[in-house]
């Protein structure tokens, strides 16, 4: 279920921890397996990660369901992680998320039919000074407006 390539990548993280503490690599392991699975995790994949790290399955499940980094439904090629926490909310995040949903024809938490994009509401991403903001991949987009969202969407291929 976990590819040899993914196991190699996970082993790099396991090697960073003392012997017997391989479960400390669970967050990176889940991230690696999620990326290999098109951006989301199934329960079977979470169990496979737990088994590979020789840790209780419930502990891997707890990590995978606690953090917003992990998706449990299919996602688009680009996941727009839109902050809706206090600073972003006070600066218009809810209206911009509605704008985004209308523009893309997709509801938050769903992937668009063509698989290009999905929208996810997330808690504070630590860029409150640039509120309202979102994250796509490793990049932050701050001080968002409808016009700026249009420009960002035009750049997604
Ligand atoms: S509240 Fe949105 S980045 Fe902090």
Image: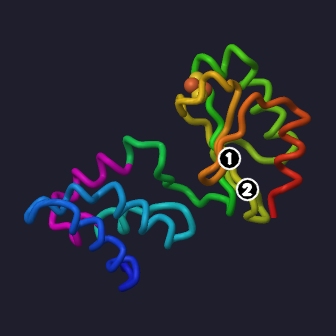
Q: At which x and y percent is residue 29?
A: 34, 64
> Element at badge 2?
strand
Q: Is residue 55 magenta?
A: yes
Q: At which x and y percent is residue 104?
A: 83, 48
Q: At which x and y percent is residue 126?
A: 53, 30
Front residue (pair 92, 131): 131
CB atoms of marks 1 and 2 within 8 Å: yes
Taking the image as shown, residue 152 lies to the left or right of residue 93, namely right
Q: Quadrant of residue 89?
A: top right
Residue 75, compared with residue 86, is above or below; it is: below
Image quadrant in which the C terminus is located? bottom right
Residue 131, compared with residue 108, is above or below; it is: above
Residue 71, compared with residue 129, is above or below; it is: below
Taking the image as shown, residue 91 lies to the left or right of residue 120, namely right
Q: Residue at x 42, y 67 (%)?
A: 32
Q: Report the magenta stretch's main SS.
A: helix
- Give, as a single range, the part of the protein colored magenta: 49-64
Q: Which residue is mark 2?
A: 117
Ligand 1's image quarter is top right
> Element at badge 1?
strand
Instruction: Choose the circle earlier in sequence order: 1 or 2.
Output: 1
Q: Which residue is mark 1?
A: 80
Q: Alpha carbon of mark 1 to alpha carbon of mark 2: how far? A: 7 Å
Front residue (pair 107, 143): 143
């Amino acid at each position: 279920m976990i590819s040899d390539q993914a196991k190699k990548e996970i082993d790099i993280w396991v090697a960073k921890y003392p012997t017997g503490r391989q479960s400390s690599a669970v967050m990176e392991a889940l991230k690696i397996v999620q990326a290999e699975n098109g951006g989301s995790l199934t329960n079977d994949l979470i169990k496979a990660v737990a088994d590979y790290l020789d840790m209780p399955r419930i502990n891997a499940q707890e990590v995978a369901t606690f953090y917003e980094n992990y998706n449990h439904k299919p996602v688009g090629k680009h996941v727009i992680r839109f902050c809706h926490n206090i600073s972003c909310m006070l600066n218009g995040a809810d209206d911009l998320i509605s704008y985004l949903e209308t523009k893309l024809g997709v509801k938050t938490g769903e992937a668009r039919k063509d698989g290009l994009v999905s929208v996810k509401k997330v808690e504070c991403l630590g860029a409150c000074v640039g509120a309202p903001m979102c994250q796509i991949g490793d990049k932050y987009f701050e001080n968002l407006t409808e016009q700026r969202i249009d420009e960002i969407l035009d750049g997604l291929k």
